[in-house]
Amino acid sequence: MGRQRMKSTRFPGVYRLPDGALVVRAVVLTPDGKQVSRTRTLPAQTSETAAAQMALQFRAEVEAELIAVADKPLLRQADLTVTDFAYSWLKDKVKAIRPSVAVQYEGALSKILPLLGKRQIRDITRRDIAEWVAWAQVQQRTVGKGPNARLEPYSQPTLRAWWRVLRLMMYDAIDDLHLPHNPILRVPPPKVAVGLKRERGTLSLKDVQALLASAKQFVPQRFAEIATMVLTGMRAGEVYALHWTDIDFPKEAIEVQRSHWKGHEGPTKTDDPRIVPLHAELAEILQEHRQYMVREQHPGLKSGLVFPSDFGGYRVPQSIYSAMDVAVEGAGISIHVTPQVLRRTFNTLMMLSGTDRITLRAMMGHSSEEMTRRYAGVNLDVKQQAVTQLFGKKKADDTDA
């Protein structure tokens, strides 16, 4: 279940989720003075009065558990490896984070533990952390398939994500295990070497038009999804959580208020709903898509989802990849295109068209202007045009000295 905002009830320690379910929370002080908060979700039919009684019982259970733990001898740190601590730490973390974030944490650990996992955690030194940083900076991933497959360095945001997980885990280990030193202190985070950095891929306006025409011709059953990503800049998870009630055709607007990830529907990435404009071309495409669903009596009609799976439930974002590859090949586009590339493209084309940063940030749902700038990638033809405007066009008869 993704993170949901809880509202207080008239009973202390009892909260209600947006879907109507009740949650009880127990906040208890440990014998050493630390504050511990635990929650438990109750069955849907539970009344608030019954929940209040359960909250008292739950608090007593948590207190008893903490007292029992305090009475046990401390775990022998000399026998605790980084791997031992990492998976225990992740097990606790997943209780309070989105499933998608938990997967990101697990992915980061898969890049941290191969080098550090067998070491005893109390013996980890700054040198060990620095060696991992040096190793992480040169790691590469496979991009593309078949004869077009190639190795590329991981992006700087990916390296930052690994570093955040390692840093958070080590600081928690220092606090929980009372380690004698902080091995991560003053170690600089990993950075992609200048010679290995790859430019973020985006499409030109001509490429976008060719992609839409190709998708309509070669993958018509997925055309509306691709068009929505192209013409709104929405995240794939937001597209597949879109309901027909979110689309206001008369006002030419789409309300983006939720996201979907592997069966979990929750708030958007930044927890903030937003309004994006509904382009006239997209409005026509979506209306035709709706008519098709009604005509075919699609199993997803009852769900209210705009882009349900063939069985009526949620589609996963990865399901569009194959159709996207077909459309890209038909359009003659040379770069690998994903929903994220389409989002960056929308961001870049809007910036190049002169859209002000505040408006663009509101449309993209970015948490900061820095994120809006980070998404921008400028194609070679745009760079060439800028250079030509600055220095003038080179004459045909000019020769090198």
Image: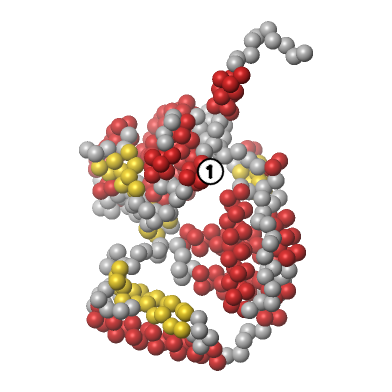
Residue at (67% x, 84% y) in the render: 76
x%, y% of residue 277? 32, 38
Is residue 221 at all visible to an observer of this figure?
no
On the picture, is 292 further left or further right than 101?
A: left
x%, y% of residue 360? 41, 40
x%, y% of residue 121? 68, 73
Residue most toward the right? 401
From the viewer's side, name the closer residue of 377 and 89: 377
Q: Quadrant of the N terminus?
A: bottom left
Say what amino acid the circle numbered 1 marks. Answer: Arg
Name the secondary structure under disc 1.
helix
Residue at (39% x, 32% y) in the render: 216
The image quadrant that residue 294 belongs to is top left
Is residue 283 at all visible to an observer of this figure?
yes
From the viewer's side, name the closer residue of 243 and 277: 277
Q: How is the image coloured?
A: secondary structure
Q: How many marks?
A: 1
Q: Which residue is mark 1?
A: 374
Q: Quadrant of the C terminus?
A: top right
